[in-house]
């Protein structure tokens, strides 16, 4: 695979963005759906329906803020799964500028939280992981997942490239093409200690995906004013350029926006690689059984705005 710098078209879009959707407070419950199937990533969770999530206080609207929580009050016996929440937008998207303001995110041993979007017939419709990680690590992993035929060229970005082939779902390998953000406030406890912040990502089929993270005290004024200008934000944390090695119009279609917290599973449940390396000493079986482990396993969502 060849590497080449982004063209000026890929590096800057020079667009004016108009808000088309604002998800805030009650609108999440009204315009997003609750996923209740078994976790595809084999987490030790029961994803609850809307009624149960509200009655168990796993989905709480307080003014304009939505809290999505993991059950932190029920002791479990061996083999039982813990209640959690996964929600997705009823509306689908094929491009846009997406700005998510989180006051806090889950930060506990055994959790695997993510803010992402996904198309139909995974991995054919693609997946864009904007904010994802496991356990009590402090750095965010940004990843694309596709079927065969999508690899990333070099692009200006702050993050470290982990892999360039976005192919997923073959022989159990779901690595995808990923970039790690070195900013210690980009995930988990570090993110929460900084009073949260904003994740913004621009998705255009002609130029690809660019992802930025801004800690609370560094959010650009144009985002706060509702007049975002990505070309003024500087180098993105992660960049995934479209080009001859990846046709975004083919690989990323009809995405629903998604927020979830699973427990353990294929990534966070790998005791040797994930739990131990991030400073967690218990096993997944012990973690999921103890409700006190999940007191900090909460999303506090101020809003998600979508621009075209």
Image (cartoon, rainbow, N blue to C red):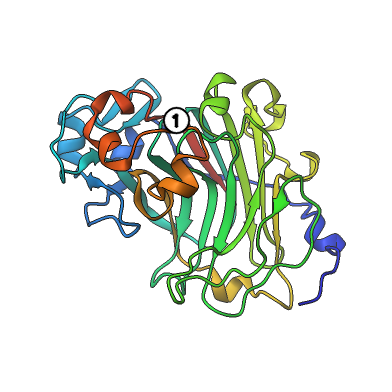
Q: Can the viewer see residue 115 in this picture? A: no
x 59%, y 51%: residue: 142
In the image shown, does 89 or 209 lie closer to the viewer? 209
Q: Quadrant of residue 249?
A: bottom right
292 lies left or right of 222: left
| Label 1: element kind | loop
Q: Position of residue 277 (x, y in %)?
A: 52, 40
x 46%, y 74%: residue: 124
x 41%, y 70%: residue: 122
57 lies left or right of 110: left
Q: Is residue 48 above or below residue 241?
A: above
Q: Quadrant of residue 40?
A: bottom left
Q: Position of residue 64 (x, y in %)?
A: 40, 24
Q: Position of residue 243 (x, y in %)?
A: 73, 73
In the image shown, does 118 or 135 lie closer to the viewer? 135
Q: Can the viewer see residue 230 in this picture? A: yes
166 lies left or right of 242: left
Q: Is residue 116 above or below residue 30?
A: below
66 lies left or right of 249: left
- Dot 1 corresponds to which residue? 107
Q: Position of residue 146 (x, y in %)?
A: 53, 70
């Amino acid at each position: 695979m060849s590497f080449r710098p982004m063209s000026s078209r890929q590096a800057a879009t020079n667009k004016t963005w108009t808000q088309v959707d604002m998800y805030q407070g009650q609108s999440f419950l009204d315009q997003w759906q609750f996923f209740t199937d078994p976790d595809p990533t084999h987490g030790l969770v029961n994803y609850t329906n809307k009624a149960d999530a509200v009655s168990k206080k796993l989905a709480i609207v307080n003014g304009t803020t939505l809290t999505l929580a993991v059950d932190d009050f029920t002791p479990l016996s061996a083999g039982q799964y813990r209640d959690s929440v996964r929600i997705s937008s009823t509306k689908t998207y094929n491009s846009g500028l997406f700005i998510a303001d989180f006051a806090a995110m889950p930060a506990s041993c055994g959790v695997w939280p993510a803010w992402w979007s996904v198309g139909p017939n995974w991995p054919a419709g693609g997946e864009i992981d904007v904010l994802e990680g496991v356990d009590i690590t402090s750095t965010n992993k940004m990843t694309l997942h596709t079927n065969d035929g999508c690899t990333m060229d070099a692009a200006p970005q702050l993050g470290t490239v982990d892999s360039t082939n976005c192919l997923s779902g073959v022989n159990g390998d779901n690595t995808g093409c990923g970039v790690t953000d070195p900013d210690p406030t980009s995930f988990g406890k570090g993110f929460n200690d900084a009073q949260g912040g904003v994740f913004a990502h621009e998705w255009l089929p002609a130029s690809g995906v660019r992802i930025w993270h801004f800690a609370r005290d560094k959010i650009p004024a144009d985002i706060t004013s509702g007049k975002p200008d990505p070309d003024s934000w500087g180098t993105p944390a992660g960049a995934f350029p479209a080009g001859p090695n990846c046709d975004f119009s083919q690989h990323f279609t009809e995405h629903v926006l998604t927020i979830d917290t699973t427990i353990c599973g294929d990534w966070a449940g790998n005791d040797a690689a994930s739990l131990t390396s991030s400073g967690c000493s218990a096993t997944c079986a012990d973690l999921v059984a103890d409700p006190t482990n999940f007191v900090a396993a909460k999303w506090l969502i101020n809003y998600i705005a979508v621009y075209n």
